[in-house]
Image (cartoon, rainbow, N blue to C red):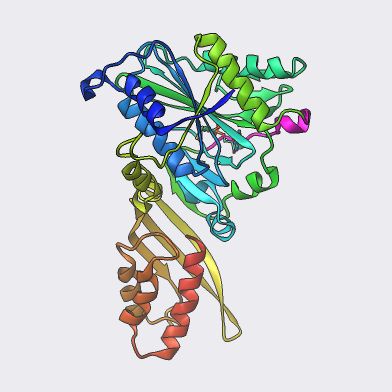
Amino acid sequence: MLIPFSLKNCFQLLCNHIVPAAGFKNTAKSGLILQSLSNDVYQNLAIEDWIHDHINLEGKPILFLWRNSPSVVIGRHQNPWQECNLNLMREEGIKLARRRSGGGTVYHDMGNINVTFFTTKTKYDRMENLKLIMRALNAVQPQLDVQATKRFDLLLDGQFKISGTASKIGRTTAYHHCTLLCSTDRTALSSVLKSPYQGIKSNATTSIPSAVKNLLEKDPTLTCEVLMSAIAAEYAAYHQVDNHINLINPADEMVFPGINSKVKELQSWEWIYGRTPKFNVNTTFSVLYEQTHLEIKVFIDIKNGRIEICDIQAPDHWLPLEIRDRLNSSFIGSKFCPTETTLTNILLRTCPEDCNLHSKWSILCEKIKGIM
Ligand SMILES: Nc1ncnc2c1ncn2[C@@H]1O[C@H](COP(=O)(O)OC(=O)CCCC[C@@H]2CCSS2)[C@@H](O)[C@H]1O
């Protein structure tokens, strides 16, 4: 049963969960089922952080159900240039988010359900949570063949991934979150999770691609709504809590004090791109200039998302050495990002009056933007 949460009773409920150190009495007897009213990936990830940071989960686990508008969610230690097609995502308005948990990259849309299990660190048990999801699935469709793997994926018919797992373990609390593919756009999923960028070297965590399937393709009655209610019902039965799905608004500062600053941090360039482990790009491209093909070599070192070393090598007769060196050093410190303003300003700073050089540098800039 869905119960819209009034601000007052939501606050009350959450207060009951807030750590006693924050001055609130903790009187809640059992767990809680929450569902987000927002489809914004940053707001929903911020709710996870907020609960992780503020709530005393001792004897009171929380289940959080949420869905996002089209987004790609990378793991904490990943490289977005290696994992997805950033240009396509920009064109299609698909958000990019970096989560706090480790692991690989997944695609979310309204056909994908996210399930977060919050517990104390001692009660944290991913296999137990996956078994709960499997029981929920079998309760609505007993014929489904779903198995959990050693990596905590859920496989349909022994071969198609329908769920991926990640987790964050804090000092006292932990959460395990997983996806569940119900009716996701599989074409978008596979095109967006294909990186077109060549020559990247890094130690970042790499994703493990699998063949995926939607539960709705197996059985058209398995809609997101049906699956979310089934998971909530199974959770309520297992943890002996109310079968209410409490709807929460992650934009509500009254209920979640400090939530907006968490959202801002998750949306920031510094968190999404700047947290990428150090990497380099070593590539070559060909430029057509006055009917001749020129080979341009590029070597760029990127640290904290910014260019640390830049070595663009073009034939000397085409781009004088001195200019090339000036251009290379102008890049240092710039964000590795095609909308970075310094990319265009470099042009004016380096060769303010030379039209010929301007046009050559514009060509190079466009090519370099293409690898960002
Ligand atoms: N939504 C979704 N669900 C299941 N599998 C997916 C999904 N999107 C992509 N994939 C497949 O998984 C691999 C990556 O697998 P890999 O094992 O590398 O990574 C994961 O599974 C991470 C799961 C993170 C879950 C969090 C829960 C809330 S926020 S995100 C990818 O290349 C695709 O083949």
The answer to whether residue 149 shows anywhere in this view is no
Residue at left 28%, top 21%?
19
Front position in the image: 286 or 102: 102
Residue at left 39%, top 71%?
343
Q: How many marks?
A: 0
Find residue 58 and report its horizontal and vertical position in percent.
35, 13
Find residue 134 and report its horizontal and vertical position in percent.
64, 17
Residues rendered magenta in the picture: 207-220
Describe residue 257's horizontal placement relative to residue 300 as left or right: left
Relative vertical location of residue 147 with respect to residue 78 in this rendering, above or below: above
Find residue 183 and report its horizontal and vertical position in percent.
69, 37
The quadrant the N terminus occupies is top right
Residue at left 37%, top 33%?
49
Residue 218 belongs to magenta span: yes
Relative vertical location of residue 135 with respect to residue 188 in this rendering, above or below: above
| Quarter where residue 181 is shown | top right
Q: Main secondary structure of the magenta part?
A: loop
Find residue 46 and report its horizontal and vertical position in percent.
39, 38
